[in-house]
Amino acid sequence: MPAEPRPLEPRSKEGAADVASLVALGLEEPPPIPTPSIQPFLAPDLPPPDEED
């Protein structure tokens, strides 16, 4: 006769593995959404172009 499976115990609050789980439990605030860049394709380390060229 096979052994009966042990019933699963509910997960404790300390077992939350990610921020979404902690937010769902009310233990953490949702992370802020970053603002989009105004000029996403302009490399910030390049100097402005010379107007003489």
Image (tube, rainbow, N blue to C red):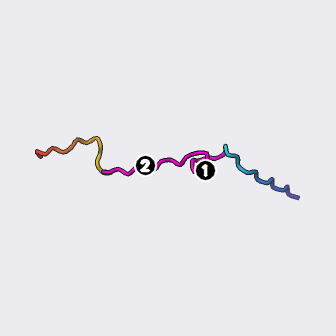
| Closest to the observer, 53 or 9 | 9
Secondary element at image label 1: helix
Q: Provide residue 15's location: percent of width, then percent of height.
A: 66, 45
Q: Provide residue 35's location: percent of width, then percent of height.
A: 40, 50
Q: Give yes or no for residue 25 being in the magenta stretch.
A: yes
User: Callout 1, which amino acid?
Assistant: Ser
**Is the magenta region chiefly helix, strand or loop?**
loop
Bounds of the magenta span?
A: 15-40
Q: How many marks?
A: 2
Quadrant of the image occupied by residue 28: top right
Query: In screen coordinates, is 26 left or right of 30?
Result: right
Q: Give yes or no for residue 42 being in the magenta stretch.
A: no
Q: Residue at x 53, y 49 (%)?
A: 30
Quadrant of the image occupied by residue 14: top right
Q: Residue at x 89, y 58 (%)?
A: 1
Circle number at residue 34:
2
Name the residue furthest bottom: 1
Q: Earlier in the sequence, mark 1 or mark 2?
A: 1
Query: In screen coordinates, is 2 left or right of 17?
Result: right
Picture layout, residue 52 above or below residue 3: above
Label 1 to label 2: alpha-carbon separation:
21 Å
User: Callout 2, which amino acid?
Assistant: Pro
Q: Provide residue 49's location: percent of width, then percent of height.
A: 18, 45
Query: In screen coordinates, is 38 left or right of 49?
Result: right
Q: Mark 2 packing: few (<14 Cα in 10 Å), some, or many (20+)?
A: few
| Closest to the observer, 53 or 28 | 28
Name the residue furthest right: 1
Circle number at residue 21:
1
